[in-house]
């Protein structure tokens, strides 16, 4: 089933010049880029995007990180795009969960600075696409 997912290449990915590498992995997987834009998240956008983590102890630090500089927001499309991107991203913890061959497993060490975000469900994808690309919502 063709679906869409919202992906962020977080400020650490831009800072470390890994945007090309990460986009190349997305393209080689076969996912289609529907939208791609360099943006800087406002506090409001960051809070909306990560609303489900508002009670977590790492939330203030996560907000500071995600608003700290430019990031790349993208919408990907393809068969099972949500699961497909999460597969190539690897688990949230880049050392304990992400395996070699994945974006996080190959390129990251820290659970917060884990380079990418991908929607975790169709409901999250719809909500997150509306936040980052309101022109695509609906
Ligand atoms: P992401 O997949 O974008 O979803 C929530 C983000 O919070 C996660 O990636 C990490 O960047 C961050 N995060 C999750 N767990 C922790 C943690 N234990 N400590 C710090 N940051 C975390």
Image (cartoon, helix red, strand yellow):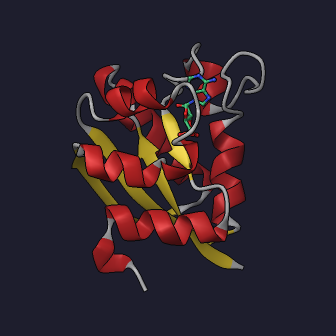
In the rendered view, would you say 100 is above or below 56?
above
Which quadrant of the figure contains the N terminus? Answer: bottom right
Residue 64, image quadrant: top left
106 left or right of 7?
right
Q: Residue at x 38, y 33 (%)?
A: 63
User: Visible in this render: residue 41?
Assistant: no
In the rendered view, would you say 123 is above or below 56?
below
Q: Residue at x 31, y 52 (%)?
A: 45
Q: Ligand 1 quadrant?
A: top right
114 left or right of 123?
left
Percent x, y of residue 128: 46, 62
In the rendered view, would you say 82 is above or below 20?
below
33 left or right of 95?
left
Q: Report the number of numbered marks.
A: 0
Percent x, y of residue 29: 62, 52
Q: Residue at x 43, y 46 (%)?
A: 8
Residue 95, image quadrant: top right
Q: Residue at x 66, y 55 (%)?
A: 120
Q: Nearer the viewer, residue 67 or 13?
A: 67
User: Visible in this render: residue 134?
Assistant: yes
Residue 61, image quadrant: top left
Which quadrant of the figure contains the C terminus? Answer: bottom left
In the rendered view, would you say 69 is above or below 5?
above
- For the view shown, which residue lies furthest in the bottom direction? 138
Percent x, y of residue 93: 68, 24
Percent x, y of residue 42: 23, 46
């Amino acid at each position: 089933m063709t679906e869409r997912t919202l992906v962020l290449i977080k400020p650490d990915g831009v800072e470390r010049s890994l945007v090309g590498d990460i986009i190349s992995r997305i393209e080689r997987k076969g996912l289609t880029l529907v939208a791609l834009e360099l943006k800087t998240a406002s506090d409001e956008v960051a809070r909306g995007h990560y609303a489900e983590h508002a009670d977590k102890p790492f939330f203030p630090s996560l907000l500071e990180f995600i608003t700290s500089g430019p990031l790349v927001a993208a919408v990907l499309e393809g068969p099972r795009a949500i699961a497909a991107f999460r597969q190539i991203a690897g688990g949230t913890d880049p050392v304990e969960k992400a395996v070699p061959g994945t974006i996080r497993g190959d390129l990251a060490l820290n659970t917060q600075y884990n380079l990418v975000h991908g929607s975790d469900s169709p409901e999250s994808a719809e909500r997150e696409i509306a936040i980052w690309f309101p022109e695509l919502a609906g």
